[in-house]
Amino acid sequence: MNNISTYIGEHKERFLNELLDLLKIPSISADSAYKKDVLNTADVVKTRLEEAGCNHVEICETAGYPIVYGEKIIDRNLPTVLVYGHYDVQPPDPLNLWNSPPFEPVIKETELHPEGAIFARGACDDKGQMYMHVKAMEFMTKTDQLPCNVKFMIEGEEEVGSSNLAVFVKNNQEKLKNDVILISDTGMIAKDVPSITTGLRGLSYVEVVVTGPNRDLHSGLYGGAVANPINVLTKMIASLHDENNHITIPGFYDKVEELSKEERAEMAKAPFSLDAYKKSLDIDAVYGEAGFTTNERNSIRPTLDVNGIWGGYTGEGAKTVIASQAFAKISMRLVPHQEWEEITQLFKKHFESIAPEGVKVEVKPHHGGQGYVTPIDSIGYQAASKAYFDTFGKTPIPQRSGGSIPIVSLFEQELKSKTILMGFGLDSDAIHSPNEHFGLFNYYKGIETIPLFYKYFTELSK
Amino acid sequence: MNNISTYIGEHKERFLNELLDLLKIPSISADSAYKKDVLNTADVVKTRLEEAGCNHVEICETAGYPIVYGEKIIDRNLPTVLVYGHYDVQPPDPLNLWNSPPFEPVIKETELHPEGAIFARGACDDKGQMYMHVKAMEFMTKTDQLPCNVKFMIEGEEEVGSSNLAVFVKNNQEKLKNDVILISDTGMIAKDVPSITTGLRGLSYVEVVVTGPNRDLHSGLYGGAVANPINVLTKMIASLHDENNHITIPGFYDKVEELSKEERAEMAKAPFSLDAYKKSLDIDAVYGEAGFTTNERNSIRPTLDVNGIWGGYTGEGAKTVIASQAFAKISMRLVPHQEWEEITQLFKKHFESIAPEGVKVEVKPHHGGQGYVTPIDSIGYQAASKAYFDTFGKTPIPQRSGGSIPIVSLFEQELKSKTILMGFGLDSDAIHSPNEHFGLFNYYKGIETIPLFYKYFTELSK
């Protein structure tokens, strides 16, 4: 393809400012207080897709936040790439740990990003990565180099489980018909080590409530005589792992894909420094399931983590109270073959069964999704590999991610096409954390690499 | 004594309105946002003590909130009663469970209080009970029936550990010299069953922090590979009780007073219905240390309860995060002979020792106090017993309370006098809980009973 770097160089500042404008809107899908902002973000994405050269763009209403759909069909005989991304973001809290306000993006130099990185909630996940595709589209249409058909499907509920997207996909199979799905919502191994994500973990996310006495009680008058819902909750959660950090829910591991010795040896070849890993997190030791390495624990093994816990008095000072209720949000990352809905049911059944007398326990399923593995011999994978090679000078490494994009396995099931996960983020980008950021190098490199995927995918499809 | 009920009858409405005015001030000592209100409350108490007939009242500054001291010395040869109470209150949260705003007192009829009860934070603990003493004082001075000397010491930090009162008492032994200390900050067995509290539990209150990675992490990318501070905290807390609900901290029980079979048999005679207890709390079973009854568990046995826990994402919806830190407030109720400072150190040492690799653990002691037992053959106890008999027509039952008034054992140590705990509250008053209330019957009965204590105590001291 011609002039990609020249075009980027000429429009560098505008490409950045458009993204910064998008990042200023707090499109927090998990918190209904931001409803107007989420809707506003969808409108902005629609306008940007039109400007980038889509000849049909629409806001598709759902039971929740809308999906922005855009397309440019140039020839029905050419292949079609479906780009998926999301315009919603994670809640920014804890706010006090941000060095700059999460919705007032700033460019700052870091050790890893001497050329600067954008600090804002959503900078990497996923506004920044999604917008690379919009700008790649602009390049291809403005320079008359779009080699195939393109469809965009940008949703606003990825951070809350994509339940309405699932319905939309099932009901719009013809409209969404494609030959490959392209997503940038994952990371690379390192800034100079491109990689393609070939596996994702599934997810089951639940909220639990333990209810004891019908009101908060004085811990002096009642302490020791009634079940304290917080103490009970800690005991119940603690019992979910055994001394080897295996999960104790009956049936939990029944369908877990066990990798062969050879596959694990292959995985172990990826560059990884345990010391650097510990140093970057400021921890003296890693922790996890006995018998597995750190890279295995966060990719090929299922996990159970408490994402939030609360109950009783959490303010300043002391209050001698026994809370009536205690709460936790718990998520399980699942590996291929584990069925998320089945795991949710296994959790619910087990957690309710271990409640002691004196309390009531409720398990509310939040959302979930299947794990996913993509083959590396597909045309899509090969096209992505060649595109990365052109811009990074290195063949990307296939890697399994510990994260989940629940919708990916649904895409395969409903649309019968494979997904290619071309991520440009880095583990150090602090997605879902305070001070999320995205390197300018990564942003522009993404815009440069994506058009090459279209080119090679079209060529290899012939 | 003459005309007590007539006097109360004539001033009933004013007695109530003065208390309601006091309850309107949110004197929450645990939350520095209410500093002005706490100080304002001290000023109101000072004015009320002057109006009630004290001839010297002063605001005594401390490193924290001031102590209101008042006195009326009529004859150095007569005995002196020192009244202790507190003008600060517990935080009112969770606010959403209150049926009326906690600092807008209202009178409502209840099943137990057909003549009405005052609903407000502090109604019983301790503004209502403390103010009974101010009004009893008014009656005795206005009708020239004060039989002895009186000193008042009303503090503003009882709900946060009374640490500055301890200093004040140590430094003012001459000023506070007395023959008996009188406190109404406990309860009675039932509305028609007066009782005198003869034992209190001690307290050790700590806050713990578990720190893992240096920032919140994405639970997909890091889940399973690093110690999750919330999971670790639940495991650590769960391990503090064994399967019989014994506390596992080494040395914790070493100094616990073991009651004889006879003493326990005596205790078991107090009227108690387990069914009514469970029904009032809406629980299907009680829970606690194996080998002890409910009434033993909450009075003669030490306990460990989590009073608050928090960490990670606790907002609406879902956030897939591994929190950097997790927190808990934990209190232990202690029995006579357990040294609270020693127990705090035992807790700290043990809790830090069980931290797994990969996290740092910090234990911050909040405050504490010693348990207390008072003999029933003292003049003070006898005077209280006769006073209750006169107004209730029944001899009060001696009982041990599960609660703590940490300052009581300090009083004995520093001032060499015994404390009489003449409580007029009920367990159902919901102190420290939403919808705290205090029966009008109890309030007026207290004002009626207290002067009789002065009378009998003076007579018995001759």
Image (cartoon, coloured by chain):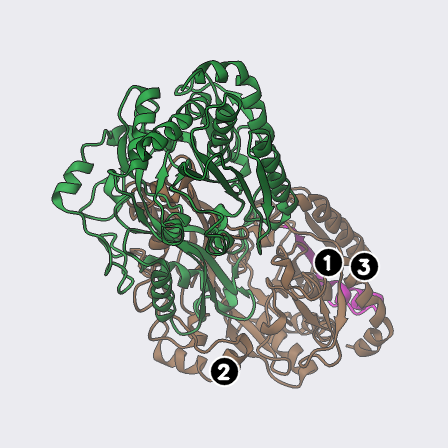
Chain colours: A brown, B green
Residue drawn 42% across and 22% down? Answer: B448
User: In this figure, which residue is indicated by the disc labeled 1?
Assistant: A103
Task: Give the mark nearer the N terminus: 3 vs 2.
Answer: 3
Expressed as whole percent of the image width and height from the top left, the position of residue A160 reads: 57, 51
Q: Residues within 10 Å of mark 2 (few under 14, many from 20)?
A: few
**Where are the magenta residues, as a range?**
A134-156
Are labels 3 and 1 on one chain? yes
Q: Which labelled disc corresponds to residue A270? A: 2
Q: Is residue A450 magenta?
A: no
Residue A192 visible here: yes
Point out the tag, 3 or 1, that comes first from the N-terminus: 3
Quick one: SS at disc 1? Answer: loop
> Disc 2 marks which amino acid?
Ala
Which one is nearer the viewer's eye here, A382 or A407?
Answer: A407
Q: Going from the N terminus, do you reach mark 2 or mark 1 first?
A: 1
Label annotation for residue A53: 3
Q: Are marks 2 and 1 on the same chain?
A: yes
Q: Tell which tag, 3 or 1, sits nearer the viewer.
A: 1
Between the C-alphas of marks 3 and 1, the distance is 28 Å
Q: Chain of mark 3?
A: A
Q: Position of residue A369 (x, y in %)?
A: 49, 54
From this viewpoint, is residue A309 visible?
no
Q: Does residue A298 lie above or below B254 as drawn?
A: below
Distance between mark 2 and mark 1 Cα atoms:
35 Å
